[in-house]
Image (cartoon, grey):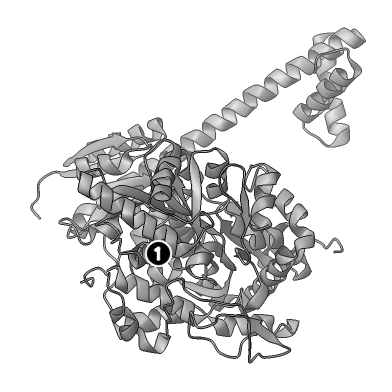
Amino acid sequence: MGDRALHILIIDANRIRASIIEEGLMEAGGARVTVVDDTTGLMRRILELDPDVIVIDLESPNRDALEHMFQVSRAAKRPVAMFVDRTDDASIEAAIDAGVSAYVVDGLKKERIKPILDTAIRRFRAFERLRLELDQARSELTARKRIERAKGILMRTRGLAEEEAYALLRSTAMQQNKRIVDIAESLITAAGLLGGEDG
Amino acid sequence: MSPLAPAPQSMVVRLGFMPLTDCAPVVAASLLGFAEAEGLRIKLSRETSWATLRDRIAVRHLDAAHMLAPMPIAANLGLTPLTDRLVVPMALGCGGNTITVSATLWSAMKAAGAPTRLEAAGTARALAEVATMRKRRGAAKLVFAVVHHHSAHQYQLAYWLAAAGIMPNRDLDIVVVPPPLMPDALAGGQIDGFCAGEPWGRIASLAGTGRVVTTNVAIWRASPEKVLGVGKIWAEENPDRLSRLVRAVHKASVWCDDPANRTELAGLLARPEIFDLPVAVLRANLERRIALDDGQEATVDGFLNFAAHAATFPWSSHAAWFYSQMVRWGDVAPSSEGYERARATYRPDLHRAALAPLDVPLPTASAKIEGALAAETAVPSTTGRLSLGPDRFFDGGVFDPERLEAYLEGFPLKSHPAR
């Protein structure tokens, strides 16, 4: 096999994650990258595209179909090895650990594959970190909204000023050794049950 | 069962499964107190592909999993990545698969004389006739789906087709589709038939888009189906925890076999985190009912067998049979080392060691001649009495694991040997 640009195929139902990985692989240079999402007709697309390396999300239900294609292709013109090199367990483990799996055409040199895998793993991890931060930010926003709502209920039903309402929530939380948002949540539920508020 | 303190971290087992009716023993072991009674806590993890279950065990995200019976063998033979990392200390029963075809294909098969009550030989003959007629007309090849290449489904389907003269991938294409997507793929015309575990055949049948034509127990009366695949290093490092796990899942398997528990079991499996399907569909599976057409049903004796007749015993002759089919279809080049490695993947020794304290009758043999029993037969056991159920192949084939080459020579249809 010569040193022409490798063709890398990324299969990921998550478009944003796929483009983050794609960008990383393009930056690394020397490769042509195609992204497809994880849908029907995938196997035919792969045959048409004829990639050297396939990077696929570990959660993809299409992994079993891919493995079948490779098992059948052993007899075909271009056998696809499952991974880089059977002896290179460390790379395989690192990839699976990060949530990606990779399939490579037989005969490609380990030195050409390793940087690709490493980049894919790094980018995959970076995306997961981003997602975690986003989830956190989202749940903080939801918490703030719930607390605002609970304050509103207290202000209306007990005639409290905003700061007083918040102080009451906070002191109750401290007494009960709970988070303010949990107290707010109980209060909203209770108000809903009592019919004074739509929950 | 009395509530126990949570198991210490050292007694946790991380166990993966796929949503199919035969995941029942591991789900019941985890959720109904069988694990706790053994001082274990099972953390269940539902996965989206068999490949990922296998790989997660290899990298030790999981300790064990509900797994396709041939999959650990294929992995240990190096057909898939991260080789030699799995052992099989127990089987998870036999039976449970249907071969289901599209309504269109069923009409053609009926016209070709297909029997209507799930007989394997007659339905295969009718299918062969349809395939031949299509070829003569120049119509596209039929496409059948299985759940993974290294699955009991793949080898059962190929066995059934080949017995009627249909050469897989020459006369009919075999593809892989995830089980929950089978009914839609059939309805959408992407596939003409599939072999998958229930409830997916039933769901296609009830939707009117498919017809169950035969079952894996019609093809091979005692066909092994799923196993408990365990990380090899984990098993070596945690012999006590492994024994507890095997005992818990064995007790759960016996519980799953009891008709008195079917309603509760169906309810358990229907839960959103397991199947997220209607209870009635799962209960029908557990009652061994197969949906035919026009609202008719057939109850198939022995269709799903969790524990009876030593169904949890990991026969090395089962591993040997799967190896024989891998060689037959060119998945692996035959070698005596490979054959030994395949057989050694199944571990009757670990099974016996784990169940020794339970006084369960277990076979004294680790391998048997497959396909030799026409009726229930008593066999020598470690304790008490044990009988094995009938285990005939529909074409009368008999597999002696000591005579692998002769067995392979007997098949008129096979692929070229793998390199």
Frontmost residue, B213 versus A27 = B213
Q: Residues within 10 Å of mark 1 (few under 14, many from 20)?
A: many
Q: Is residue B41 left or right of residue A129?
A: right
Q: Position of residue A127 (x, y in %)?
A: 43, 37
Q: Position of residue B193 (x, y in %)?
A: 41, 48
Frontmost residue, A183 versus A100 = A100
Residue placed at 33% from the left, 48% from the top? B143
Q: Which residue is mark 1?
A: B160
Question: Is A29 situated above or below A87?
Answer: above
Frontmost residue, A59 versus A187 = A59
Which quarter of the figure has residue B418?
bottom left
Residue placed at 47% from the left, 34% from the top? A130
Question: Is B163 situated above or below B105?
Answer: below
Q: Is residue B241 left or right of residue B174?
A: right
Q: Is residue B106 visible?
A: yes
Residue placed at 83% from the left, 37% from the top? A177
Total count of labels: 1
Q: Is residue A57 visible?
A: no
Frontmost residue, B401 versus B347 = B401
Q: Position of residue B307 (x, y in %)?
A: 66, 71
Q: Of helix, strand and loop, which one carries label 1? A: helix
**Amino acid type of disc 1?**
Trp
- Specify the farthest residue to the left: A2
